[in-house]
């Protein structure tokens, strides 16, 4: 039984066999035989043996004969000091092991870097699998010092990355996030975004984000994807040109985005922008399902917006509504 196992659970209390056995040993000064203690305390032999084993493991009883039948109580302060020292020793050993792992892996870093510089393709590296992705994101977050810029194509990405954002914000790192308007309609995503804004993040929304990506310190780009088998994947990009492109795209979206303010926001503040995006896609002949997928909303919600748009324009067909709306918005923009 490990130390962790011993001390996770309910606190000692009357009626607990472990407490009763220790109190019995302290009162008697010794347990001559577990069978006698069990009978005196009205415990089953199994309960008594398990309690004694627990107390020996936690250093509160000490075996006092060669046969392992006689036990004497130990001062709880001495038992505590003994256990703590063993835990501290284990912590030291684990830290030493961590240092050895890092040192060992570091020896291969130069080899990997030399091989990477020999090929332009190495500017993009792919990681597949939830464990690898989480490990890399933690490493990237730990190394980040100044700023994180995030484009979130789906609400799930915000949930997956929220803890990293909160940790970065607590360290004073600037976090700016662009989500799709649909985030305003999803209650759980909205509450999550409120936690981020309360912690200091700046969150804006737009009608459509083409792909989820995060830029750390304007240098390291991480683009998210999903493999054919459903496994999470990321592409980490160490390329100045690609980073510059992503930064330009982020800034373009940011200038046209709408700030997320409060938790009860819904679509009210972005209705025109959302209808304009829907109209533009309808004018291109996309089906309801495709329009919904591109805007990251349910087909039902999308159809509700299309119905409102057709009613407002007095249109007789989806295509007609799309063309008329696109012209109207284009004229307004001009």
Image (cartoon, rainbow, N blue to C red):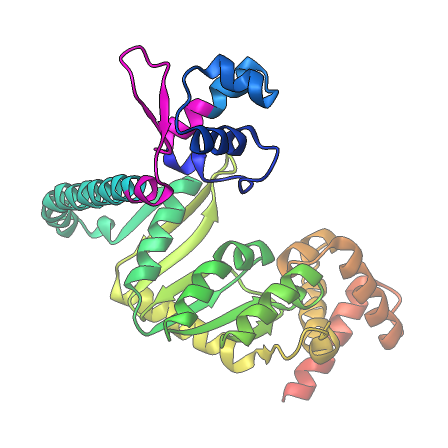
Query: In the rendered image of this protein, does residue 196 appear above or below residue 23?
Result: below
Q: How many marks?
A: 0
Which of these two is toward me, 113 or 58? 58
Task: Say which residue appears at 57% left-offset and 69% top-offset.
Answer: 195
Could you say where residue 262 lies in the image, as x and y percent from the top left? 66, 78
Can residue 203 be seen?
A: no
Was residue 58 drawn as part of the magenta stretch in this picture? yes
**At 45% across and 39% down in the image, what residue appears?**
7
- Position of residue 266 in the picture relative to residue 122 (left or right): right
Residue 54 versus residue 37: which sits nearer the camera? 37
Q: Position of residue 310 (x, y in %)?
A: 85, 69
The N terminus lies in which quarter of the figure?
A: top left
Q: Which residues are magenta?
A: 52-81
Lateral position of residue 320 relative to residue 87, left or right: right
Closest to the observer, 313 or 101 = 101
Quadrant including the C terminus: bottom right
**Residue 177 appears in view:** yes
């Amino acid at each position: 039984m490990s130390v962790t196992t011993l001390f996770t659970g309910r606190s000692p209390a009357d009626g607990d066999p472990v407490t009763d056995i220790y109190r019995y040993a302290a009162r008697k000064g010794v347990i001559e035989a577990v069978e006698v203690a069990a009978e005196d305390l009205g415990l089953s032999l199994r309960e008594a043996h398990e309690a004694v084993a627990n107390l020996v493991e936690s250093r509160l009883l000490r075996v006092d004969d060669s046969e392992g039948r006689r036990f004497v109580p130990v001062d709880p302060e001495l038992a505590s000091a003994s256990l703590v020292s063993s835990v501290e020793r284990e912590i030291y050993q684990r830290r030493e092991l961590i240092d050895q792992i890092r040192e060992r892996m570091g020896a291969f870093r130069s080899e990997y870097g030399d091989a990477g510089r020999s090929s332009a393709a190495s500017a993009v590296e792919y990681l597949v699998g939830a464990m690898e992705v989480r490990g890399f994101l933690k490493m990237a977050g730990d190394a980040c010092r100044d700023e994180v810029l995030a484009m979130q194509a789906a609400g799930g990405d915000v949930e997956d990355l929220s803890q990293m954002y909160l940790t970065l914000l607590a360290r004073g790192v600037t976090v700016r996030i662009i989500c799709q308007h649909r985030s305003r309609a999803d209650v759980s995503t909205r509450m999550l975004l409120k936690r981020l804004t309360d912690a200091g993040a700046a969150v804006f929304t737009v009608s459509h984000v083409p792909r989820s990506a995060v830029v750390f310190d304007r240098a390291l780009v991480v683009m998210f994807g999903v493999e054919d088998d459903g496994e999470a994947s990321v592409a980490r990009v160490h390329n100045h040109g690609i980073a510059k492109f992503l930064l330009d795209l982020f800034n373009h979206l940011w200038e046209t985005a709408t700030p997320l303010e409060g938790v009860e926001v819904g679509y009210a503040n972005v209705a025109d922008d959302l209808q304009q995006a829907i109209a533009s896609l309808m004018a291109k002949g996309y089906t309801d399902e495709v329009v919904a997928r591109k805007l990251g909303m349910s087909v039902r919600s999308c159809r509700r917006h299309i119905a409102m748009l057709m009613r407002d324009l007095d249109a007789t067909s989806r295509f007609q509504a799309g063309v008329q709306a696109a012209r109207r918005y284009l004229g307004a923009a001009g």
